[in-house]
Amino acid sequence: MEANQFKDFGKAMIDYAANYLENIRDRRVLPTVEPGYLRPLIPETAPEKPEKWEDVLKDVERVIMPGVTHWHSPRFHAYFPTGNSYPAIVADILSGAIACIGFSWIASPACTELEVVMLDWLGKMLGLPKEFLSTSGKGGGVIQGTASEATFVALLGAKARAIGAIKREHPEMKESDIVAKLIGYTSSQSHSSVERAGLLGGVQLRPLQPDENNKLRGETVEEAIKKDLEAGLFPFYVVATLGTTSSCVFDRIDEIGPVCNDNNVWLHIDAAYAGSAFICPEYRYLMKGIERADSFNFNPHKWMVVNFDCSCMWLKDPFWLVNAFNVDPLYLKHEQQGAAPDYRHWQIPLGRRFRSLKLWFVLRLYGVENLQAHIRKQIALAHYFESLVRTDDRFEITQEVIMGLVCFRLKGSNDINEALLKRINGRGVIHLVPSKIRDTYFLRLAICSRMTEEADIDISWKEVKEAATEVLTEQK
Ligand SMILES: *Cc1c(COP(=O)(O)O)cnc(C)c1O
């Protein structure tokens, strides 16, 4: 393809993308296709001769769209939001054009330097303690692909730090014996990626019981650490969540932090979804105690209108992490080593895309003001849906609504709520997923699309209400 064709194809695709997003409400949120739908729609082998881009673009509607779940439809209320905005899409085009691999400073200085500064901008926007910023001298941030990677990378940093400390105290111990005795902790309500980080890292992670409001408390962590110390284990890592996936509750990091600090245990904060809300000062009370944490992570690609993937992680002291993965073959060495971070040491893969462009474009073209307005509007829409649910006494709200997630259910059995969810998704107008805490099954309605308005919430509520009437009538 020549540049002239690229310009035409690119312009046509921009038009297609804008029309897709502006008219997304007209599409059924969940596709009706069956598994295997796609193969018969395209040839069995790749074409020998080049095709025309016009034909490829035509096939997007014929082949792809019937099998798309429309995550940016205001009818999509499943999981948590995933970010999307025009500035971020345009930034990804540029990132695709530059197409550098920014594993070290010299591999593309702008790629590293913009990332360092963007993480400082963003850290200031959230009100993170200055120890997390690169300007503090020691701390700093990095863009990981996902929160799952951040949790895993923090675990490896914590593991390296703990092994170092234990070796100094017990020089006679073999490293394999130390690792076998390392023990970490997290709430039974934390994301499945935390358990996975333990499995990948080859260490034990103990799930702890949260309190009756589903928050992990300091006392619980303290007791577990004490017991394990008595049993001769080495407590080394705690993952606390701000905004759990199941019901968006906030662990008490103001209580957990001091316990971790006193015991030289690394505290990692997973705020994948809710972290974006901290750009609004009125929500920062939810991260009280953050100054006690060793690492903090949230996903602008969830709730801050940046397209996947962009998961921002800050560390007070990246030394342990850099140390945990440091291999330094000659072909990756360069003369400016040490002056700027070589981000290859901060992550699992070597290669990394120019992701900070997405942040730069979004922060400049929205401004902090409009990003705050976005968060506030989405939370207000969640409260609006909550108020509608509360007008109908067949329903109950199962968790205090704090962010853009409403957890609710029909009063009655789990079976009736399972039937309700199946009915709602079967009708195909809106899409929700359920969750279950302590054997109580409930429905989660997340405000996802940045284009959601009150009129959309009215439609979603009407769907829920009508589906409930159908299900309850059939039960009688
Ligand atoms: C979504 C979510 C994750 C996983 O995010 P990825 O970036 O997809 O790995 C982790 N923790 C919490 C609390 C989440 O809500």
Image (cartoon, rainbow, N blue to C red):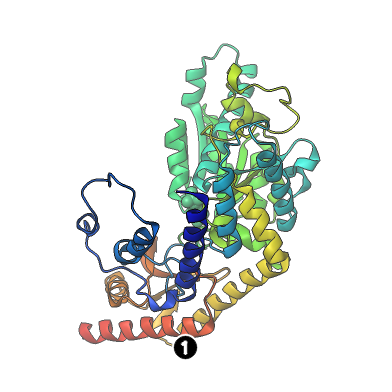
Q: Which of the 4 quarters of the picture holds residue 323?
A: top right
In this rendering, the answer to whether 358 lies above or below 448 is above
Tell me where residue 209 appears, x and y as whole percent.
Answer: 47, 51
Q: Is residue 280 visible?
A: no
Tell me where residue 362 appears, x and y as whole percent.
Answer: 65, 60
Q: Which of the 4 quarters of the picture holds residue 392?
A: bottom left
Residue beneath the point at 60% across and 34% down? 346
Q: Which of the 4 quarters of the picture holds residue 124?
A: bottom right
Residue beneath the point at 31% across and 63% down? 67
Residue closest to the far right? 136
Foreground of the two, 51 or 132? 51
Tell me where residue 365 appears, x and y as whole percent.
Answer: 68, 64
Image check: 296 left or right of 129?
left
Q: In what quadrant of the picture does the C terminus appear? A: bottom left
Q: Name the element at disc 1.
A: loop
Dot 1: within a 10 Å radius of its alpha carbon, few (fewer than 14), some, or many (20 or more) residues? few
In this rendering, the answer to whether 245 lies above or below 376 is above
In this rendering, the answer to whether 20 lies above or below 103 is below
In this rendering, the answer to whether 5 lies above or below 76 is above
Image check: 343 left or right of 192?
right
Q: Which residue is under mark 1?
A: 391
